[in-house]
Amino acid sequence: MTTPSKDAPSNPRRRRVLQSAAAVALAGLAGCSGGDDGTTTAPTQTPTESTTTAQTTVSEASQRETAIELVQRLAAGEYETAFGMLSETVRSQYSAARLERDWTQTTADYGRFEGVSGTTREPTGGYEVVVVQAQFEAGVLGVQVAFEGASIEGLQFVPLGDAYSPPAYADESAFEERELSLSSPACDLGATLTVPSDGADTGVVLVHGSGPNDRDETIGPNKPFKDLAWGLATEGVAVLRYDKRTYACDVSAGDLGFDALVADDALTALDRLRAETDVSSSAVVGHSLGGYAAPEIASRDGDTAAFLLAAPSRPLYELVPDQLQYLADLDGTVTEAERARIEDAEATAERLANGNYEGGGFAWSAAFWRAVADYDPVETTTSLDGEVYALQGGRDYQVSPTEDFPAWRDALGESNTALYDDLNHLFVAGEGDPNPNEYFQPGNVAEAVVTDLAGWLG
């Protein structure tokens, strides 16, 4: 998982997208005037008596269903249909082509659309505004849909997030950081090397999950890789983290195979870690997709331990339908559009399971699926000479503590595995039913995870 942050990204293409997402209202509310900067202002008129009556006769449930349908139409690329759902007033000021452009530019770096994770309701300026939380592979986008009765009178995309705060367990006086650049065929990748002030005998490379991740694996206000880097460096471990190729370069996951998307840059980072430090031992610490790939990376490197954080043990195509089903069930109602998306994912998974990789699937290329067709991460793990450890959050709905983690525990044993009951996919503590919205509440990787990693690395 993977997501945009409020920090200004170094990549100019990403910066333009995020500025658009944060600042541009896609369509003015009825009676609004547009500012010179492309933003819109809230309506100043007071709703008429007929408007108030319409609002009371249209149920909140109906407005919510309409708002969700609008988002799902946009996510499916049905821009003409979505445009037709807007009021006549908004359509007269807008166009389907601009709606398509604004949606695709805003969501360009969010990765695959995974469904709607929730809605909230915010009466604003005499309108009923339903905020649909659109869950993508790399984050959540708030889609604000303004209603006047049954009519959609406004639409705006708002990234959800807050400010990052370092974890209390990180002692910034205990380490130093310096910027590096890693070579890749697509472009140079920005990187940060975090080194304890007294030097380090052990060093690790952090490998991202799916989606266009920056070096901190930023999602909303959270930066789990920065937490790990600062926490481990405080404990005497050197850490190298780097921007993923799909974040730093003008390429998408659909353009790349498994090696180019994950393995090659991690191997480059391991070599660079050794060249820049005096570490005598090293490890690859992979999260999610990076954890799935970590055994293969360790096998190719030949001289590194592997730590698997929330690593799938099953074929990757099995996870997506499960995730979509979970998200659809969160609010207790599975809509027809959600059911169709789940069935489509199930059909794609079945196609991939049958070895038909034409056209790829789930935003990954045919080359990616061919490369992992015969890859069994658990079997690869058991063949490694170096140490391997698996860590899992008990509140993880993306990689299952009941469907994925048991295979790691069976293969590695109790001493080399850890399950943290109250941690989610980011290894941040939470309560209740896990949901993607909590990724956008400020938090940090649990200290117990850093302590366990440091102990094993010690």
Image (cartoon, rainbow, N blue to C red):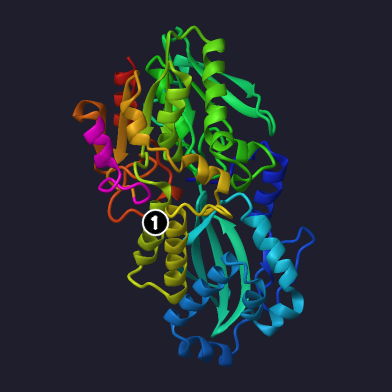
Front-most of residues 383 and 40: 383
Front-most of residues 90 and 276: 276
Secondary structure under the numbered disc 1 in the rendered image: helix
**Residue 35 image position (x, y, % from top left):** 76, 63
Near mark 1 (Cα within 10 A), the count class, few <14, some 14-19 or many ≥20, is: some
Quadrant position of residue 12: top right
Residue shown at 39%/61% (left/top)? 327
Q: Which quarter of the figure is the C terminus placed in?
A: top left
Q: Assess whether residue 404 is covered by the magenta stretch.
A: yes
Q: Is residue 96 left or right of residue 121?
A: right
**Residue 363 image position (x, y, % from top left):** 55, 52
Front-most of residues 148 and 342: 342
261 versus 436 height, above or below: above
Q: Is residue 397 left or right of residue 49?
A: left
Q: Assess whether residue 345 is covered by the magenta stretch.
A: no
Residue shown at 30%/38% (left/top)? 392
Front-most of residues 132 and 358: 358
Residue furthest right as drawn = 36
Residue furthest front as drawn = 355
Residue shown at 44%/29% (left/top)? 296
**Residue 106 image position (x, y, % from top left):** 64, 56
Residue shown at 53%/46% (left/top)? 3
- Which residue, given by chain and number where applicable, does mark 1 sit on? 323
432 versus 283 height, above or below: below
177 versus 112 height, above or below: above
95 versus 141 height, above or below: below
Residue bounds of the magenta highlight: 397-411
Q: Is residue 232 left or right of residue 212?
A: left
Check disc 1 and give the amino acid type.
Answer: Gln
The answer to whether residue 446 is seen in the rendering is no
**Residue 332 image position (x, y, % from top left):** 32, 70
